[in-house]
Amino acid sequence: MKLDQNTFRLTDKGKLGSVSLVIGLIGLAATSLGYFTDTKQFYHSYLVAFAFWVSIGLGGLFFTMLHHLVNAEWSTVLRRWSESVAATLPLMAVFAIPVLLGMGELYHWSHVEVVANDAILTQKAPYLNPTFFVIRSIGYFVIWSILALSLYRTSLKQDSGHSASLTQRFRRISAPGMILFALTLSFASFDWLMSLDAHWYSTIFGVYFFTGSLLAVLSFMVLIGIHLRRRSVLNEVVTIEHYHDLGKLLFGFIIFWAYMGFSQYMLIWYANIPEETIWFHHRWYSGWRWVSLLMIFGHFVLPFVVLITRASKRNLIVLGSMAVWVLLMRWVDLHWLVFPTLHEHSPHLSWMDLTSIVGVGGIFVWYFWRKYSSHPVIPMGDPSLKNSMKFENT
């Protein structure tokens, strides 16, 4: 991998893209075979993989819009990473198709006869019905794609020369975009994940899903940065100071994720309403208890203890290891959300869990790398670029 120091374009893009594409195609081909052996397992495994990777794309969109809204300088050198991650969202719309086709296997509310004999589902039918579900899903991706591609293309235009109008355009997109993002992400999490058990509901669920998405994209950006650094790309541009701030954000949102998870549990436990407590009952008074404990100690306690010191956030081996661990816990979190509806009494890992996450992920990383490596790898025309490169933590 080689970088032209004058244009900041990769003259040698390395093998990450091509290797990811091959792995992704093999993973998807292997996963497709599972459809013919165990259809329900296939759709549930695929839903976890889809939710995992689309959440990274959504995290990238949020990071980019937040950067523009608060007029951040430190993250300018990282912006092309988050923009390229967000630009994968149109591709993820294609990966949503199997979820829509598998409604009958995933969501019991999609069956007319089930709804007719269930008073709760009958009341929710105006919202939870296949036609409206498809319309909403299309709407989510239309909004996300417009926001992501508008920011990405405006950023590329800025590379040719900055003007005040471009800065205003970033903010005009990001300000209403943040409101649309909050609404669509929340409702998407309700539709794709919470409605798996349509008798249960939580008003915090959207924030819980968002927090996991941001943790995932921060971890992904750390790993992309380390991948480039090991190949001597952007070593003088993205410094240890930037990794330190990514580590601080990762640490902070680990705490926020735990706070959202605990708040959701505490309010439901305190109210003690049967149709609410049954969701947690399935995840505690069964073999899923050990996964619930893993969520507490693996997703919160361990990374909290490791990342609490300043030194750990500035050590790329430690920070990179925690990024991998947080991504693994993100997958466990989604598995914990999805699979008790299929395997109620205990966890049951399938080979499709691996092939689906690798298959969708391989294509995701290939497309991300294609978007990122086709243009200057930093926003060349941004007026705050020099200050970002000189950024130091105090």
Image (cartoon, rainbow, N blue to C red):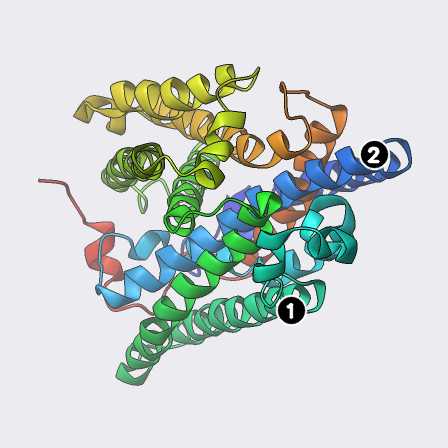
Name above or below for residue 187 compared with residue 331.
Answer: below
Residue 99 visible to an observer of this rendering: no
Look at label 2 and name its amino acid.
Ala
Residue position marked by numbered label 2 in the rendering: 30
Residue position marked by numbered label 1 in the rendering: 132
The quarter of the picture where residue 1 lies is top right
Residue 388 visible to an observer of this rendering: yes
Name above or below for residue 139 compared with residue 46.
Answer: below
Structural crowding at the residue carrying mark 2, measured as other residues with C-alpha within 10 Å and reported as few (<14), some (14–19) or many (≥20): some
Looking at the rendered image, the disc whose residue lies closer to the viewer, 1 or 2, is 1
The image shows residue 100 at horizontal and vertical percentages of: 72, 57
Give the residue at the far left of this rendering: 394
Look at label 1 and name its amino acid.
Phe
Residue beneath the point at 48% across and 35% down: 227
Is residue 334 left or right of 41 when viewed as pictured? left
The quarter of the picture where residue 246 lies is top left
Is residue 269 left or right of 377 when viewed as pictured? left
The image shows residue 217 at horizontal and vertical percentages of: 44, 44
The image shows residue 65 at horizontal and vertical percentages of: 35, 64
Give the residue at the far bottom of this rendering: 165
Name the one closer to the observer, 367 or 198: 198
Name above or below for residue 377 compared with residue 334.
Answer: below
Residue beneath the point at 66% across and 36% down: 357
Q: Gap in Å between the C-alphas at discs 1 and 2? A: 32 Å
